[in-house]
Image (tube, rainbow, N blue to C red):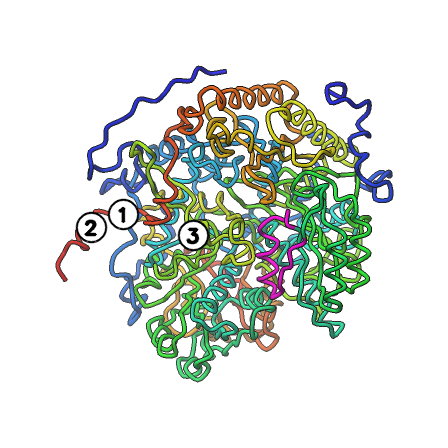
Amino acid sequence: MRTLTETPRRATKPGAPPPGIRTIYEKSRPGRRAYSLPQTGVPEVSLDELFPGVARRRRPARLPQIAEVDLVRHFTELSGRDYGVETGIYPLGSCTMKYNPKVNELVAALPGVRGLHPYEPEELVQGALELMDTLSRWLAEIAGLARTTLQPAAGAHGELTGLLLVRAYHEDRGAEPHIALIPDTAHGTNPASVVMAGYEPATMPSDARGGIDVAAVRRFVNEHAGDIACLMLTNPNTLGLFETDIVEVARIVHEAGGLLYYDGANSNAVLGRSRPGDMGFDIVHFNTHKTFSTPHGGGGPGAGPVVVRDILEPYLPVPVLKKTAAHQYTLDYDRPRSIGKVRSFYGNFGVLVRAYAYIRALGAEGLREVSDAAVLNATYVMAGVRDLFDVPYERPVMHEFVVSAEPLRAHGVRALDVAKRLLDYGVHPPTTYFPLIVKEALMIEPTETESRDDLDAFVAAVRAVVGEARSDPELLRTAPHTMPVGRLDEVAAARNPVLSQRFPDDEVAAARPT
Amino acid sequence: MLAAVGISSLDDLFETIPAEVRFDGRLDLPEPAAEADVWRELSGLAARNRPADELVSFLGGGIYDTFVPAVVDAVTSRSEFLTSYTPYQAERSQGVLQAIFEYQTAICELTGLDVSNASMYDGATALAEAAILAAAHGGRPGGRIVVSGGVHPEYVQVLATETHGLGPAPVVIADDGGGLTSAAALRAAVDAQTAAVVISQPSFFGGIEDLAAAARIAHDAGALLIVVADPLALGILASPGQEGADIAVGEGQSLGNYQNFGGPGFGFFAARKELTRRLPGRIVGETVDGEGRRGFVLTLQTREQHIRRERATSNICSNHALNALAALVYLSWLGKDGLPALALQLARSAAYLRERLLGVPGVEPYTRGPVFREFAVTLPVAAGDLVAALAQRGYLAGLDLGRFWPERGNTLLLAVSESRTRAEIDAFVEEVSAHLD
């Protein structure tokens, strides 16, 4: 473990330019360039001849002028201030930050993958269509359901797609329910997606065991007969606990005419161990960037394929893949009951290829081992840290767990401070303050990626930080101390937003009397 | 490890799952495969495709084979960018955050608007989000979205699908028969119930729209103007902001991203500063730490779903950060001079291709007036037949617009890349001519 030293305070003159790093715009110098353009031999017609009478730019976009080496150095410098799965353990709960196998990057970079135009004649892209069809079938098998659309670009996008399918299903039956049930442990995307689909979310409480309160669901459904569109659930839920009453919940919602939506964010817990379709869910989205190892990319791109029960198949977005003969596929747009399209083209194909490679490499046995190791690792870390915190629900955890840092408040230390101090120990902190029903929540998901050595090191870091919270709480409240910057002022950032580069000529223009 | 957690078998870990929903079978998936076998299988599938750059491609329609310089992959393959997540821990994510800040700056510069978010899934979903914003902002919940017939048909479809539960279906006004918006038809379609007008620059058919006129029509009715823009065209054309747009969105793929069979690219989203607190998605802002050192954070998060839940501006909780990074690297590689130079080269090649094609007997113009990198022509034969025939000769001849509009089965949309040479264009025109003979 590294030695920790306090960063010396630096004097800053009021009004002086912010010290430290420079943006690429501040590194720009007139006359420098990196670009080159091919010679085409096409006649060099002037702009005036090409665009007579057309409104043109008054001034060029102020993009940087920079040499190629300086461009590369700039981004190398930036990457040095970041932390990825390849840097070390990344136990960000609910995000499933697992290792991204290298071969997946190679296959995604094949010319026959990344060089395809979406409007090429179908005969020229049969390999791509077959890949999509095969992946669709694999995902359906893992979900325990019938049909897949690969179109949604992310988990939240899958949720919206799923809810639009729910809507189409009810509309087709002449029903107009407008309530979607959501537990209070749900991801924030769930209620936001519900509203985007034109429904109204109704929050269901959790019971004393940290599961959805079945009695509350039953009561609510009875009081709102005919008005229940669906229930959205994550299982295991965001507390890392399996919703053991799922079968009963599914029965209640189905009997009320509603559908069940499975937020697949936590699928890493149950691969080959339990299938949402068998639990009673009608619609499932997977996050390929969580469960199937596609890189998170600093926030995306991901993919959010959606799998449905056969009754929902007519409503899937167009186009739908159709097999016409052995190794022959077509894209079917003639789907009168389809909800339409939720994304241009066919989805994040380049991401889906990586998910295909991952599932192909692991097979049924490997996927089951993934979940076995993910749950074992979480259980192991939980055992290593549980005495330090409050444990809100005394139940076996699955791929992640939530503890409360509430006991540290006696020392004036909050969950956020624990997270910031963990940065100084060279590990990525867990998710904080989620789910909302646990005070001072720390949500820890080590994933199957980490070895026992790395888990032990993480547990040691957490224990050391909690020790410091008791002996020297100020050290936590002012953390981090070893990062390129100290704790950043988020309040100031929001109160007076600076959302793009301030250029010197803007300031000159602003100072000029009008 | 089992002993350390007090269990005797891995199965014990799953006892919490009720027996009736435990899966005791074996998933019907292939056997596990060694890396070499994965590589072979996927190489085999990829080999059954013909990448556009192995052919002479004139395909566009929203995805373009613009050259991706080597610096892009060099940067985006760095593991700290590739394998990190949304920068929740700002102090340990300054690289990603600064890159997004620089990206937002580039988008503001291109669009001539004040604020940009951190990027979105694609151009089509960015448009849907813009329409949702417009309806909420104008105090016209359930307000109608009036869409020019010059907007990409798939974007219109996505807009209609994603706003299905929120209000009336968007109204699409037919183009003027020359691939452009008819000002008269637009004016007639816009009224006090209109939340926003959507226009594309250039139009889907490649023509140059009069954004200022559209802005006047929208604003006279109290509606917002949303422009779907081709970012490279903005190297030459007046920016949406300059012409009065309130929001600009678009597909950013051709900024340093591969075609990827349509995804992932990314959507960009920029707006006037009055709309800042209604923007969907992530936004990065500049701030300082306790010692006055400059840093970057995710900001204005009270718009977002993880805080606002059902009152959020959108359900989006991610962006296409890596694709936006590719765009930033690409735009930095092009730089202030390279962007207009590239745009000019595209316009010259498109003009040359069009002039040559219109010299072929039976080929008539569809798109009226100047074009940027793309234009449509009408053929004396079905466009699909020409495309199929020329595919045999090593060409992707363009996009058969009968795909979207049955009545346009003879209309072909063609695009150029900056790499297309005069010799390739001449040879292609000869092939077209021979086919039509």
- Magenta-colored stretch includes residue A191: yes
Residue at mark 2 to residue at mark 1: CA–CA distance: 8 Å
Q: Residues within 10 Å of mark 3 (few under 14, many from 20)?
A: many
CA–CA distance in space, label 2 to label 3: 23 Å
Question: Which circle's residue, 2 or 1, is located before the other in the chain?
Answer: 1
Q: Look at mark 2 in the image and give the residue it sits on.
A: A507
Type of the residue with mark 1: Arg
> Which residue is nearer to you in this view: B337 or B350?
B337
Q: x and y percent of residue A398 in the render?
A: 71, 35
Which chain does the residue under circle 3 lie in?
A: B
Q: Residue at x 57, y 69 (%)?
A: B166
Q: Residue A233 location in percent, x, y?
A: 70, 50
Question: Disc 3 designates what residue?
Answer: B117
> In the image, what residue type sits under mark 2?
Glu
Q: Quadrant of the C terminus of chain A?
A: bottom left
Q: Is residue B101 left or right of residue A174?
A: left
**Is disc 3 placed on a helix, strand or loop?**
loop
- Labelled pair 2, 1 in contact (Cβ < 8 Å): yes
Which residue is labeled 1 in the image?
A: A502
- The picture places residue A161, in percent across and down from the top left corner, at 64, 59
Q: Residue at x 18, y 55 (%)?
A: A509
As drawn, is B185 to the left or to the right of A267? left
Alpha carbons under labels 3 and 1: distance apart: 16 Å
